[in-house]
């Protein structure tokens, strides 16, 4: 549990105690007044569309013992109503939070595992945490809170956990560098190098460089997907290859899956003569499971326990969620999208019997590569035997255009400007035994399509 006295943090980001007791302790730091409990510490963070510093009155009403704020004119009349509280002003609350987490990390004597990659970070993080939980008490990044703020809050929320699994995200150079230098991970995982955020970074090669920043703070082995072209090439030419653990399906790897198969019960493979069954469909979850074995071996988890856990995985909402609605099957993968994740989702759709309908929307943050990446997805439509294609958005229309160019039946390819038009059409044509994949970037709000068909 966080146990730092106020007097010990007054040198961070020019912190000044405006009101209160320097001998009191900071406890349970929260940035959300909706979750504040009695005696918690509230920190006001400023985002693009809100300023959390302005909510300090609400935090005090909820029972916050301490408020850490910046750039705010305090109402002394309000403060007088809470005589036993601590008010700390700092130059920058985000800077303060990150530096506090860095100090906390230096005190920790437990292992930290960091996960990054273009696709599959959250699922991989969750599977690793599930596997480790068979032997240890595990703290993990909540949801996909994988920025400097989320990572800092995760580290500062530690109570009696014995191991931490952190997700690290980025959209530009320097972000992974900051995260890894805060966390100082004992083990790191790079799931793949794809095209997510290519609009910011300019090329997949630059994405690789940005992800490899994780090495700056890494103190132990790096685990990489050896089937990813850029990671595999980097590994083969790397002088520290002895510190790298590989996993893969197609390329010879330390952890290599063989004899892959899929059915309504999930995905199946062999690993070193052991039969492994996952209750989730998709090649990408086989990759995630291989990571789990690699991490499990590092921390002496029984293979029997790993195999048992993989049979009963629980996915987060809106990530390859299989919904049965009367005689209809919906694959809800609406959390986010990239070329790679659409590729894997279409592959999963192809496993189902009956009519296969792909509902695909714009993938955002691709910059000048937007048209080409959507056209590349269009080339997958025939490959995965999709029966009907529905796209929403100007970029997704290139999926449609490319698919029909490759010979997909034009009468079964439809592009709509809005989700509402797509919903109306789907409700008109859906029938028993259909399987409908719904996938797009989070900003497309495709969850409403899932809810209304």
Image (tube, rainbow, N blue to C red):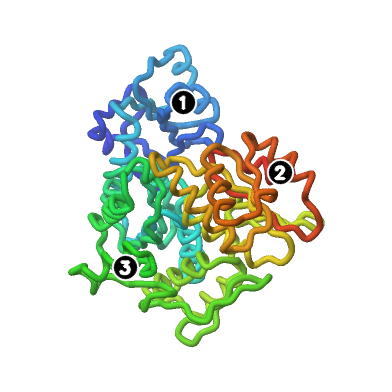
Could you tell me how far apart the alpha carbons at marks 2 and 1 are, in whole angstroms?
27 Å
Q: Position of residue 399 (x, y in %)?
A: 54, 48
Count of numbered circles in the view: 3
Residue 445 shows in the view: yes
Q: Which residue is mark 1?
A: 49
SS at mark 2?
helix
Q: Residues within 10 Å of mark 1 (few under 14, many from 20)?
A: few
Residue at which label 3 appears: 232
Seen at 26% across and 50% down, the residue is: 181
Q: 278 or 164: nearer the eye? A: 278
Could you tell me which secondary element the residue under label 3 belongs to?
Answer: helix
Q: In the displayed orientation, state which residue is furthest to the left.
A: 239
Q: Residues within 10 Å of mark 2 (few under 14, many from 20)?
A: few
Answer with mark 1 or mark 3, whichever residue precedes in sequence.
1
Q: CA distance from mark 1 to mark 3?
A: 40 Å
Residue closest to the eye, 148 or 57: 148
Q: Secondary structure at mark 1?
A: loop
Residue 451, numbered circle: 2
In the depicted structure, whether residue 159 falls above or below residue 78: below
Residue nearest the observer in this picture, 37 or 297:
297
């Amino acid at each position: 549990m966080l146990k730092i006295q106020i007097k010990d943090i007054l040198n961070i980001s020019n912190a000044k105690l405006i009101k209160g007791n320097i001998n009191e302790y900071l406890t349970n730091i929260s940035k959300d007044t909706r979750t504040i409990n009695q005696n918690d510490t509230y920190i006001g963070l400023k985002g693009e569309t809100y300023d959390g510093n302005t909510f300090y009155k609400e935090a005090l009403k909820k029972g916050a013992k301490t408020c850490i704020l910046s750039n705010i004119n305090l109402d002394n009349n309000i403060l007088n109503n809470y005589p036993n509280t601590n008010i700390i002003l700092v130059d920058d609350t985000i800077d303060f939070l990150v530096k506090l987490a860095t100090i906390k990390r230096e005190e920790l004597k437990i292992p930290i595992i960091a996960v990054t990659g273009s696709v599959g970070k959250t699922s991989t993080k969750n599977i690793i945490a599930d596997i480790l939980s068979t032997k240890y008490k595990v703290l993990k990044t909540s949801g996909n809170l994988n920025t400097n703020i989320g990572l800092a809050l995760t580290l500062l929320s530690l109570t009696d956990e014995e191991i931490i699994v952190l997700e690290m995200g980025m959209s530009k150079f320097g972000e992974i560098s900051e995260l890894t230098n805060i966390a100082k991970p004992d083990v790191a995982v790079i799931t793949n190098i794809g095209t997510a955020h290519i609009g910011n970074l300019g090329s997949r090669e630059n994405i690789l460089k940005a992800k490899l920043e994780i090495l700056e703070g890494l103190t132990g082995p790096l685990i990489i997907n050896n089937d990813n072209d850029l990671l595999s090439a980097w590994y083969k030419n790397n002088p520290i290859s002895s510190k790298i653990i590989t996993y893969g399906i197609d390329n010879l790897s330390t952890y290599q899956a063989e004899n892959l198969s899929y059915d309504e019960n999930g995905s199946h493979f062999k690993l070193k003569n052991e039969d492994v069954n996952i209750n989730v469909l998709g090649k990408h979850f086989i990759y995630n499971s291989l990571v789990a074995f690699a991490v499990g071996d590092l921390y002496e988890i029984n293979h029997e326990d790993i195999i048992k856990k993989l049979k009963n995985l629980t996915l987060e909402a809106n990530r390859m969620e299989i919904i049965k609605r009367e005689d209809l099957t919906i694959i809800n993968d609406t959390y986010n999208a990239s070329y790679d994740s659409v590729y894997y989702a279409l592959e999963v759709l192809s496993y189902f019997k009956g009519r296969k309908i792909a509902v695909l929307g714009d993938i955002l943050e691709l910059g000048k590569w937007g048209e080409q990446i959507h056209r590349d997805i269009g080339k997958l439509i025939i490959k995965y035997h999709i029966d009907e294609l529905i796209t929403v958005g100007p970029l997704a229309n290139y999926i449609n255009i490319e698919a029909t160019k490759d010979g997909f039946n034009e009468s079964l390819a439809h592009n709509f400007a809005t989700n509402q038009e797509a919903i109306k059409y789907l409700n008109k044509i859906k029938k028993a035994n259909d399987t409908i994949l719904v996938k797009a970037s989070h900003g497309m709000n495709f969850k409403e399509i899932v809810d209304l068909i």
